[in-house]
Each structure stands twice: as C-alpha cells, then as structure tokens.
Amino acid sequence: MSAKPFIILADETLSIAGPISNVFAFLSNHENYIRWYPGVVAVTSADGLPHGTVGKVYQETLRLPSGRNRVFDIKVVESRTPDLFMTEGTLAPLHPRMEMRLTAKSAHETVLSLKFFSRNQSAMGRFLIGALVRGVVRRQSLAGLRKLKSLLE
C-alpha cells in the first residue's frame, strides 16, 4: 500500500531584505525557531552535529492551543546551503514536516517559501488535522513570518 500525500497545513511566501546566506544561516539553526515562531517554548540541540546538517536532532517544546506543553524531537531531513531546509517532527498525531525554500531575488533580498505539512496517514487523523489544525498552523505561520521579517531586517 502506498503512502498518502502529506496534508498541507500552511503555504506562505515572504520577501526579506537581506542576503540569502544570512537568512539561511538563521533559519538552518533551528534553535532560532523560538525567536520567531508562535507557541514554541524551547528548542535545544539533542546532539553535537552542526546546525543545518542532515540528521541533526533538536528537542522542541511547543505550547498547544489547549495550553499544555508537548516535548518532541525535530530532525533535519534535508538541507542544502543556501536554499533548502527541511525538518520532520515526532509530534503525534500531527507528524509535522516543515519546508523552507529560499531564493535570492537580488544580492540584498531573499524570498522565503514556508510550508508546513502533516505526515499523518490514518483516515481519522487526516480528517481531524485538516478540520482542526490547519487554521491554527496557518495563523501561527503568518504571525511567525511577520516576526521573522522584523528580526532579520
């Protein structure tokens, strides 16, 4: 049986006044995630691998909409300097995937495409995530991108 396609939770694009190398360096250090993404309470490296390295694992604490905190692992699954950074998390039942693609619009302007997905494969989980989680993730992503832009410009 083949895997079902991932559920798209957010798909946003933002232009940042800054060189692509600086934007990538900031984003590929997932410990910076706490500085710009809403609901993130803590992010720490779980191993000694350099930031931006495929296989690097972080431990993330996220405040859920219910107000409870959940701790889970985030693993870098793909990273290509200076234009691609992808992670996947163990947070069940969401099983999140984040994709950040960067394009140099000029020497001093970078376009960031941010996508969040759920890798959940169960029919009920997919239905509930689509109905209940998509709006929350989209709102958080938009707020996070506004904060990211203000941090990097």
Image: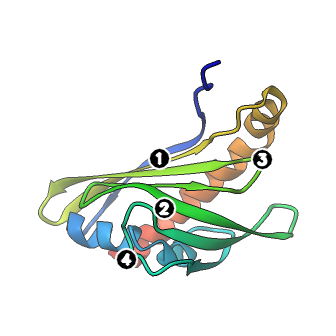
- Compute the Cα span from label 1 to label 3: 23 Å
Q: Residue drawn 48% across and 61% down?
A: 145
Q: Quadrant of the N terminus?
A: top right
Q: Position of residue 52 (x, y in %)?
A: 36, 67
Kindly indicate whether the residue at mark 1 contacts the one at mark 2 (C-beta within 8 angstroms). Answer: yes
* Residue neighbourhood size for the residue with mark 1, other residues' Cα within 10 Å, grouped as few (<14), some (14–19), many (≥20): some
Question: What amino acid is at disc 1?
Answer: Glu
Residue drawn at point x = 56 percent, y = 49 percent: 97
Q: Position of residue 37 (x, y in %)?
A: 57, 68
Residue 56 is tagged as none
Label 2: how many residues lie within 10 Å, few (<14), some (14-19) or many (20+)? many
Q: Residues within 10 Å of mark 4 (few under 14, many from 20)?
A: few
Q: Secondary structure at mark 1?
A: strand
The residue that mark 2 highlights is 145
Residue underneath mark 1: 12
Task: Name the foreground residue: 5 vs 41.
Answer: 5
Is 127 left or right of 150, judged from the image as shown? right
Rendered residue at 61%/26% (across/down): 3
Q: Earlier in the sequence, mark 3 or mark 2?
A: 3
Dot 2: what SS?
A: helix
Report the Cα–Cα distance between label 4 and label 2: 24 Å
In front: label 3 or label 2: 3
Q: Which residue bears the numbered disc 4?
A: 50
Numbered label tally: 4
**Residue that badge 3 annotates:** 93
